[in-house]
Image (cartoon, grey):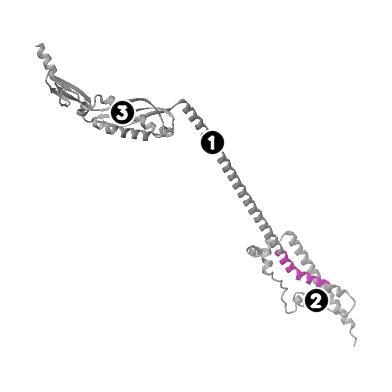
Amino acid sequence: MLVAAVTVVSAVEIVDAYDKEALTVFGEFRKLLEPGVHLIPPFVSRTYAFDMRTQTIDVPSQSAITRDNSPVTADAVVYIKVMDAKKAFLEVDDYKNAVSNLAQTTLRAVLGDMELDDTLSRRDQINDRINEELDEPTDEWGIRVEAVEVREVSPSQEVQRAMEQQTGAERRRRAMILEAQGERRSAVEQAEGDKQSNIIRAQGEKQSQILEAQGDAISTVLRARSAESMGERAIIERGMETLEEIGKGESTTFVLPQELTSLVGRYGKALSGSDVQEMEGLESKEFDEETEKMLGLEDIESALEQLDTVADSDLRTDETRDADTARDVDLARQEEETREADRDIELETESERPSD
């Protein structure tokens, strides 16, 4: 019974779901056992299990000299998977150890073909080159290299100190460049601000001068028009005063200039009520184009039109109203004195006539 039990145990082989086993009988390879329960020849059979899952192989740290003679140290991780268990059993003694040794030599060779800066910055390139170097020999072993990852590349202590100094100098250089650029930009912005400020100030001064000149021109035109309207009236008043002085004289013969007779004829209807033909008023001269441009009269046409539309009562100040009232009183007094002078002349004329 004991021999029978041992025989049964040695004749039954159970293969796990993630394994395949190579079967040998009397040292001769027979077949691969798939997952499940298998009956094999007892006592003369041996099995070798192969894990069909993805496996991780840790590549030990390797020292290498880069192309620019800088010593570095690097380690990596290789991910492999058994694709053909028969080849892995027959073609290589220990596929894990073989892949690990091949990865170490390949890592040193790849690092030796690159410069220090490339080994530190181009990890993807290192991984791809190692993967390519491992693909061809591992295919003959029934092994597929799925990925290679370089975990760390470390230069020597002297190189690290030199790199730190270089990095510090580069950062200081960038800081100085940024500071210089900031100062330049600040100076440019300040210059632009001063330029805009000067432009705005100059425009304001120009506009102020233009408005001041236009105001002076408007004032000049208004004074000219006022003088034009008041000039003829002043001449008439002066003529009336002259007639008054003539009427006070003792002579009975008077010589009147033509201008005075024209004035008397112009205002005869107002003085005596007679129907005397009225004459047109004095006309002012027009400004030429150059004078109008110099005075800015073209720009103030609209202002003058607005001034003309304003009511006279709104434009007249209290002083102007008082002056007009006093002038009306003087005119009334002069008219009364003129009538008295005319009556005196008529009486003197009648007294000088010879009696019948």
Give how far across and how far down residue 181 sits, in percent: 55, 41
Give whichever of 277, 299 is nearer the camera: 299
Please say if 58 is above or below 249: above
| Residue name at image x 26 percent, y 26 percent | 95
Q: How many labels does the image show?
A: 3
Q: Give the range drawn in magenta.
A: 221-241
* Label at residue 138: none
Indicate yes or no whether the magenta region holds residue 248: no
* Residue type, numbered disc 2: Leu
Upstream in sequence: badge 3 or badge 1: 3
Upstream in sequence: badge 2 or badge 3: 3
Give how far across and how far down residue 277 sits, in percent: 73, 79
Give whichever of 80, 314 is nearer the camera: 80
Q: In this view, does 271 lie to the left or right of 118?
A: right
**Occupied quadrant, residue 22:** top left
Please say if 232 is above or below 88: below
Indicate yes or no whether the magenta region holds residue 230: yes
Q: Mark 3 points at which residue?
A: 102
Give whichever of 70, 130 is nearer the camera: 70
Give how far across and how far down residue 39 sits, in percent: 12, 22
Q: In this view, does 80 lie to the left or right of 235?
A: left
* Residue type, numbered disc 3: Leu
Q: Name the residue under label 2.
A: 260
**Occupied quadrant, residue 34:** top left
Distance between the alpha carbons at the discs numbered 3 and 1: 44 Å
Q: Name the residue under label 1.
A: 173
Distance between the alpha carbons at the discs numbered 2 and 1: 99 Å
* Residue type, numbered disc 1: Arg
Q: In which quarter of the image is the C terminus?
A: bottom right
Give whichever of 235, 302 is nearer the camera: 302
